[in-house]
DNA sequence: TTGTATGCGTTATCAT
DNA sequence: ATGATAACGCATACAA
């Protein structure tokens, strides 16, 4: 298909290319109603489609947003298999497309950072999911680019952040267990890093315990990686070596499902013998057997908010760097927590 | 950050911009080893990053691949929540990035098709997942663009296609049930459309039945939509109204999980009372309780193949339009099928 | 082997 | 209000 250019349109309409450009970009008061008509007519007839590369070259706006998500440990694939990321991305894409933007979805290769991509493509902005090493953020700052960080506790004024109240979430989950009469409550989680999402949830867990006058037992926290496999391992461990544990708070639904599996394999039933509560409310949470009780964080909706936030930062609508935007959390009671009362 | 251009590099290296461009694009025998050295040196020092928009303008190559996946029924979001798509996309992205390409992931708005996007962004190629209406493909053909269709039975010479032997898959699943002594075997599936993936699986189902001398009973096929919810509905129906059904072949793991839930809710156990087999081997299949027996189709690997295939079509390595590439299928026996023998 | 000059499609500046 | 025209950054045909 041969390309129809702005020049073709201008000739057809009998005006200059500048005029066409004006109506294309809706420059108010620069063109007479009459030319607008003619130009629009010509555009229709010729089926003109603007070239974004040329646009990008001419005015440094690409209508392209970079979305970065973590990769698997071997760096070979995106972590999109994790429903958390894929659901979040859904929310982002919907909002972006609706606003006339496109999304370049990618991971970052260690070694060369994201700066390259950002410059190569003239990105208008970026949304970063996951946690990376310090140098990555430093680099990001150099490119003066509107950026939205997801679930980050890095409070740098250069970035916008969309988060949740993780401490509260951890508290909510643990309290729910306590309210159902549980006292031996394990925490199964990924590595607890300083100022990380998980640390906050861990803090919430401890707060709920303390508030209820329960003893915090470090042996009851199982800390390794945020995977189904580790959950399974921990579940087995709990079943065999910790008879006093009657409930588990897993800081991610994936882990929770693993815990359930581990428990089952060791002959324990959920919630008959041990109760389990997750975190995230992934779409698969409702599909598990029994359906998983968990903490909902409206993932797709947050994706949409992130995109909205970025878009506002791009056209300067938004204030410089507002406080992190926190979406509300809520408990979703399904079938994996049994009342001991 | 101010942009470093090819001109800056040329000045720094004391050569022409053409020379720089040559070494950038590895034009063999056009430049002396000496200039190569100098240019590379300058590039390093200035941290030069090429502008892909400019490149795209100059030679019509964007290093951009469009990846299209279906949207939810209300058109509001990508179907990326479906693990099949997200896993497939993982495979695509990995291969693409490794080859220096980026991926624009999006759905298609009904009304305006994909032609716009393709032209606007000067896409080098596209990978299309899912089934769309005829007009969509017609449009695609107009843009003379290398295209890979996934799981399509549209045999048009303009497209490459990466598929699986769906008929065989349906056969494999059903035979497994039969080999375990089942004779009342239901099929739970999305709409069976002519020349669609599901029809082939359906055909495989019937072939296995016939081969075993079993009567095909149209009342045993539950046909509506490929969702967990419909599976649940069908599971309930089966539990209450079809006592002679002892096994279910669901044409997707998501549906299979739904069936299990429906069965459970009606007081039936899986596989105690009813056996279930799925299709796809999504990563969540192994996480279900009990873990789902299913037909594996190496999803991520297929994504990678699709990308590879597209890349070859782009640089003309590949033959015109070869026969569809079919990846092998395999049965994954886990815990949802019980032997009746 | 190297450099000059032109074009790619668009926007923006400046006259008119 | 409208129209020439110069950027934008890069690749390439052609000249040297």
Image (cartoon, coloured by chain):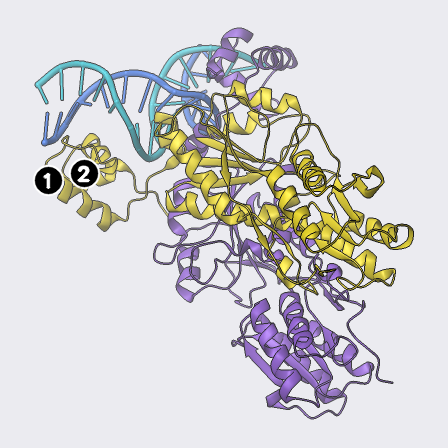
Chain colours: A purple, B yellow, C blue, D cyan
Residue B101 falls in image quadrant? top left
The correct choice, above or below, for B96 with respect to A57 in the image is: below
Residue occupied by mark 2: B11
Instruction: Indicate which disc, 2 or 1, sits on the residue closer to the N terminus.
Output: 2
Residue at the spot 26% in from the left edge and 37% down from the top edge: B6
* Residue B176 marker: none
Task: Classify mark 1: helix, strand or loop.
Answer: helix
Tag 2 and tag 1 share a subunit: yes
Residue A295 shown left or right of residue A108 in the figure: right
Residue A167 visible in image: no
Q: Position of residue B94 (x, y in %)?
A: 44, 48
Q: Residues within 10 Å of mark 2 (few under 14, many from 20)?
A: some
Residue at the spot 63% in from the left edge and 33% down from the top edge: B108
Residue at the spot 47% in from the left edge and 39% down from the top edge: B306
In the rendered image, which quarter contains the C terminus of chain A? Answer: bottom right
Mark 2–mark 1 distance (CA, rounded to whole Å): 18 Å
Q: Position of residue A338 (x, y in %)?
A: 82, 77
Residue B94 visible in image: yes
Residue occupied by mark 1: B33
Residue A330 falls in image quadrant? bottom right
The correct choice, above or below, for D8 with respect to B256 in the image is: above
């Amino acid at each position: 298909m041969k390309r129809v250019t702005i020049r073709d349109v201008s000739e057809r309409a009998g005006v200059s290319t500048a005029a066409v450009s004006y109506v294309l970009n809706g420059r108010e008061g620069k063109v007479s109603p009459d030319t607008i008509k003619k130009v629009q007519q010509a555009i229709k007839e010729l089926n003109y489609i603007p070239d974004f590369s040329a646009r990008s070259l001419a005015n440094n706006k690409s209508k392209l947003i970079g979305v970065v998500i973590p990769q698997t440990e071997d760096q070979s694939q995106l972590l999109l298999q994790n429903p958390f990321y894929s659901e979040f991305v859904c929310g982002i894409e919907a909002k972006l497309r609706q606003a006339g933007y496109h999304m370049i979805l990618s991971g970052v290769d260690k070694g060369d950072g994201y700066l390259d991509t950002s410059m190569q493509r003239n990105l208008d902005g970026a949304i970063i999911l996951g946690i990376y090493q310090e140098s990555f953020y430093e680099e990001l700052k150099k490119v003066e680019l509107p950026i939205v960080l997801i679930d980050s506790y890095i409070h740098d004024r250069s970035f916008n952040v969309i988060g949740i109240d993780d401490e509260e979430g951890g508290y909510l989950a643990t309290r729910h267990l306590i309210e159902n009469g549980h006292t031996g409550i394990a925490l199964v989680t990924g590595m607890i890093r300083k100022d990380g999402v998980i640390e906050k949830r861990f803090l919430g867990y401890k707060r709920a315990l303390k508030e209820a006058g329960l003893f915090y037992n470090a042996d009851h926290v199982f800390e390794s990686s945020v995977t189904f496999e580790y959950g399974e391992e921990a579940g087995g461990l709990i079943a065999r070596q910790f008879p006093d544990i009657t409930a588990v708070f897993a800081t991610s639904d994936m882990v929770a499902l693993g815990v359930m599996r581990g428990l089952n394999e060791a002959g324990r039933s959920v919630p008959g013998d041990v109760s389990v509560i997750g975190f995230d409310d992934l779409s698969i949470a409702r599909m598990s057997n029994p359906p998983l009780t968990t903490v909902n964080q409206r993932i797709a909706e947050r994706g949409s908010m992130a995109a909205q936030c970025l878009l506002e930062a791009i056209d300067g609508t938004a204030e410089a760097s507002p406080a992190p935007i926190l979406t509300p959390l809520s408990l979703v009671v399904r079938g994996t927590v049994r009342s001991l009362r």
